[in-house]
């Protein structure tokens, strides 16, 4: 019985000592600096945020026009006719592909180039002819292989669909020439 009481006392003392926090000096809030700005160690270790994108079209007068990145449900932004589109991302991408589709969901023929740097990706699409007035197009950024693309930090980047429409009235296709009958 005496051994049982002694064991119980030793266990209780061990738990009491282990559960007590060590005394520490009071400190300032780690999330607020002296100037009042937020600066936590977690934010510093996290690095840059997720990849973000911007899309521009080159105008005939060599200017550039930003194309708003909206979903298909929000309507299509209207742009001027162009033969060059530039997609930029804030981080380099891995396992990605970029394609431009017409309103019949056919991939457009283009001469593409990609420039990767630590500051991100510049993907340029050069079309042999300007986009047709009044027609709708969709730029798709998705995974080349597998189910997902990643940024340079190893984070998954969701697939994107960027719809837009070219300004002007829709051009009607030319009727095919009539064949002359031979006699």
Image: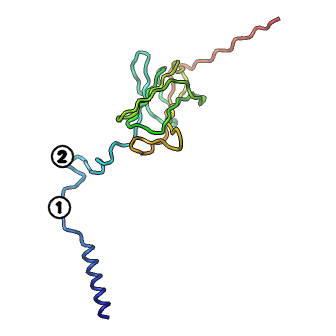
Which image quarter: residue 173?
Answer: top right
Please name the residue shown 30% across and 86% down the image: 7
Relative depth, front residue between 77 and 155: 155
Residue 125 is situated, as x and y percent measured from the top left of the image, at 48, 25
The quadrant of the image that shows the N terminus is bottom left
Question: Is residue 15 found left or right of 175 in the rendered image?
Answer: left
**Eyeballing the image, is 95 above or below 26?**
above
Instruction: Identify residue for label 2.
Output: 35
| Helix, strand or loop at mark 1 | loop
**Eyeballing the image, is 76 above or below 40?**
above
Please name the residue shown 40% across and 41% down the image: 152
Instruction: Please tell me the numbered disc located at residue 26.
Output: 1
Instruction: Please tell me the numbered disc located at residue 182.
Output: none
How busy is the neighbourhood of tag 1: few (under 14 within 10 Å), some, or many (20 plus)? few
| Helix, strand or loop at mark 2 | loop
Residue 117 is situated, as x and y percent measured from the top left of the image, at 37, 33
Q: Find the residue positioned furthest to the right.
A: 183
Colour convention: rainbow
Q: How far apart are the two marked residues, 2 and 1, measured between alpha carbons?
A: 19 Å
* Whether label 2 touches label 1, CB < 8 Å: no
Relative depth, front residue between 120 and 86: 120
Please name the residue shown 42% across and 45% down the image: 155
Which image quarter: residue 2?
Answer: bottom left
Residue 36 is situated, as x and y percent measured from the top left of the image, at 20, 47
Q: Look at discs 2 and 1 and give the one toward the viewer.
A: 1
Which image quarter: residue 8?
Answer: bottom left
Please name the residue shown 41% across and 24% down the image: 65
Question: Is residue 173 found left or right of 23 in the rendered image?
Answer: right
């Amino acid at each position: 019985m005496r051994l049982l009481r002694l064991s119980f006392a030793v266990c209780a003392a061990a738990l009491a000592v282990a559960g007590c926090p060590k005394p520490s000096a009071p400190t300032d809030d780690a999330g607020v600096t002296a100037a009042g700005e937020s600066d936590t160690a977690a934010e510093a270790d996290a690095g840059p945020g997720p990849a973000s994108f911007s899309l521009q079209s080159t105008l005939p007068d060599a200017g550039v026009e930003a194309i708003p990145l909206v979903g298909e449900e929000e309507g299509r932004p209207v742009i001027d006719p162009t033969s060059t589109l530039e997609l930029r991302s804030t981080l380099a991408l891995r396992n990605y592909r970029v394609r431009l589709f017409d309103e019949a969901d056919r991939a457009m023929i283009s001469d593409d180039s990609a420039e990767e740097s630590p500051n991100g990706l510049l993907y340029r699409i050069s079309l042999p002819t300007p986009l047709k007035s009044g027609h709708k197009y969709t730029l798709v950024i998705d995974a080349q292989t597998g189910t997902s693309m990643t940024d340079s930090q190893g984070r998954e980047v969701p697939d994107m669909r960027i719809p837009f429409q070219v300004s002007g009235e829709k051009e009607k296709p030319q009727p095919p020439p009539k064949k002359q009958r031979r006699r």
